[in-house]
Amino acid sequence: MSKYLYNKKATFNYEIVDTLSAGIQLHGFEVKSIKTSKGGSLEGSHVIIRNGEAFLVGAHIPDYQMGNTPAGYNSRRERKLLLTKKELERILETEHSSGLTVVPLSLYSKGRYIKADIAIARGKKKYDKRETIKKRDSQRELAREFKTR
């Protein structure tokens, strides 16, 4: 299992409540682009549920080869997520009842398939983010101290 894209800002901006693994519906050239690490980004993307189906909105997956992609290709198009009915119901239930949001954490491979890790998350307040920064800085300083000794 290797991770191709990772949403670094998700753990900083959100408090992760629960995680799920979902299949993602991609075109062939998008799969090639992801597997060859052509770039791409999950920052600013989120998951919406429309008509009983989940979609990944705002994820940027660049084209693999400029000349071989279709003329109207949109790198930020909505991509369908493949979830079970129970998972969709759980997401809908938590999203509506407690004001949580669903964000993607990473895209990874499992066998020959590309999967998406998605998280049900609660937005952090500004003081929570400052606390996270303080913890990270103190851990970095401790690591430097142990390294020099």
Image (tube, rainbow, N blue to C red):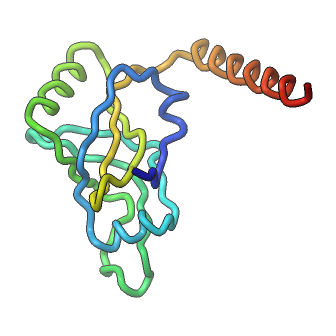
| Position of residue 133 in the picture relative to residue 94 (left or right) | right
Using the rendered view, name the quadrant where residue 127 is placed: top right
The residue located at (37%, 35%) in the rendering is 103
Q: Is residue 29 left or right of residue 48?
A: right
Residue at the far front in the pictured view: 149
User: Which x, y percent locates residue 69?
Assistant: 35, 80
| Residue 139 place in picture, x, y as percent | 73, 21
Numbered label tally: 0
146 vs 28: above or below: above
Q: Give the residue at the far bottom of this rendering.
A: 67
Task: Using the image as rendered, state which of residue 20 and residue 80 is in the foreground.
Answer: 20
Drawn side of residue 130 relative to residue 138, left or right: left
Residue at image point 33% right, 72% down: 73
Image point 65% across, 17% down: which residue? 130
Please state, as top left, top right, bottom left or bottom right, where the C terminus lies in the image.
top right
Q: Is residue 104 above or below residue 72?
A: above
Q: Nearer the viewer, residue 49 or 37?
A: 37
State the image coordinates of residue 10 (x, y, percent, origin top left).
48, 33
Q: Is residue 144 above or below residue 65?
A: above
In the rendered structure, the answer to whether residue 138 lies left or right of residue 19 reads right
- Residue 79's image quarter? bottom left
Residue appearing at x 34%, y 73% in the figure = 29
